[in-house]
Amino acid sequence: MSTNDILLGIGLIVALAVGSQILASRLRLPALILLLPAGFTAGALTDVVHADRLVGAAASPLVSLSVALILYDAGLGLDLRHLEGATRSVVVRLIVLGVLLTWGTVMALGPVLLGVPVAVASMIGVILVVSGPTVVGPLLEHVGPSDRIRRVLLWEGSLIDPVGGILGAVVFHSLVAGGLQTGHFRVGAFLGGIAVGLAGGAAGTALLWLALRVLRLGETLGTLAQLATVVVVAAGCDILYDDTGLIAAIVTGLAVANLPGFDMPARRPFFETLVQLIIGLLFVSIAATVTPRLVVPVLLPTLALVAALVLVTRPLLTLLSTARTELRRGERAFIGWMAPRGIVAASTATTFSASLAGAGLSGADRILPVTFLVIVATVALYALTAKPVAERLGVAAPARARPFLVGGAPWVVDLAVCLRAAGLDVLMWAPLAEQRRRIEEAGIELATGELMAAATDPRARLEGVTAVLLLTDDDDFNALARVVLADSVDGPVHRIGPPPGSQGVVAPYTAGDTLFGPGLPRHTVAARHERGARFRAQPASAPPPAGHDTVLVVRHDGRLEPALGDRPPTASDDDTLVLLGPAQETS
């Protein structure tokens, strides 16, 4: 390829990767639904996006190291405190039984449906045992199920990826050593690969302890140290045994996230951006290697295989894995309807398919197109059905807003009562005993102190809460809590504005719009309420009475939209306005 062809190919891959993710976010779809067709189409129309031609023999190692970075980032988001009780037992069963059932299903049906030898069916089966947080995570964000479901599926997807990678390497070497025939499974090689990965994870943890704790590198150098450590350790492990770098990466991430002393921030903008870019580049470039000539002959047989995996294997696996646990029937059923394949399946298929085909294994050229079609079919199926299935099973997040009001002043309780009258499920928290009594007397659900403490943990979540309104008398607390709670809520976090000219430590200088607009800071709202002003709800079809200010709008579908900054919310006739009345004149 010429220099111009390489530049065109790199530019096109980056444009498709980023453009597809931006478009997917606008359409509220998992990015994978657009990334794979974009790469497939680009690969069919041009040769400049084929990774093997752009980077040659470096393509497979670059893919492996990129996946290691993805899994390290996934490990940083896993909290071992949540892997206990029913969650731990379900996750372990899903991984162990999932490998056996999925592998067995493909080995049994592959030769019949796909017309491939048992050796190829064995390779396809072990590739398809993986799932992955890169596809499960966005689907769960779209559905918003309970934290229990979220934890089970994220842990399963994150842990089965490296296990599947090691299994794939063991099966590959077993096939090659057995003369490209299905031979005995080398248990020693599998256990040895896990040992190499665990040793790499220990080495990565030690290196990051040195960099982040002993040397106390700042944010920029600390991030560079993490990136370098993951790449070096994963590369070293892969040199010793294929794909063991995946285990090393996720073990390192788990250790850094859970060992005391590291104190990793909840948000990692550089890593989040890097991982998003890597995911896009990998899916586009891998999909580009799958040509229509390879896909068409296996299209219908692969769809039949997908039907078996989705309708029989996964439900049976979930039934066995969740038996005699505290999971509700709807939760078990939803877990049984969520097993998309992702980047690890694509990357391992790319690596092993080319190697086995080059070694002369009959039918090996079908490994990649079959895997590609399974990824596309499962992601599309679950993306289009996850939300309605979750709603039907009663495990989806409620459509109506559940605002969490923090504060216990009389005007805050009055606002909570008004929102409840408008049909919202209101939750409150307040620090003082007197304020908490006021909330309970008003009949509003009161969050426990432990819940607020958990909310300020960057790794925790406020389950079911769709918006937080910070309304305490401490402006600095409101400003700081807005930053801390941003990662614990599936929705916006707003604070009441401080009095103009206030001399708080951080409140006057914290960016972001404040509730109710500049004309209604905290002290003004409190003073008006003290002089008799009250919150009231009325249909938006009627004009607000004179002297009333619109502070919130409850949409007809239950969503809550506050007035922010100098932007009053717009309302349609079927919405509900929350108004603050005028203060009563005193004689």
Image (cartoon, grey):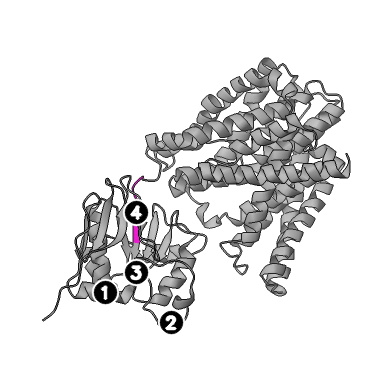
Q: Is the residue 101 above or below the residue 328 in the image?
A: above
Residue 471 disc label: 3
Give the residue number, with chain letter if any, for mark 2: 504
Quadrant in which residue 307 is drawn: top right
Give the residue number, with chain letter if any, for mark 4: 570
Amino acid type, mark 1: Ala
Mark 1, residues whose alpha carbon is within 10 Å: few (<14), some, or many (≥20)?
A: some
Residue 190, percent from left and from top: 74, 40
Amino acid type, mark 3: Leu
Q: Earlier in the sequence, mark 2 or mark 1?
A: 2
Q: 183 or 439: which is nearer to us? A: 439
Mark 3, residues whose alpha carbon is within 10 Å: few (<14), some, or many (≥20)?
A: many
Give the residue number, with chain letter if any, for mark 1: 526
Principal secondary structure, stretch drawn in magenta: loop
Amino acid type, mark 4: Thr
Quadrant in which residue 115 is drawn: top right
Q: What is the distance, in whole Å, between disc 1 and disc 3 at their CAs?
A: 10 Å
Picture mark count: 4
The region drawn magenta spans 399-404
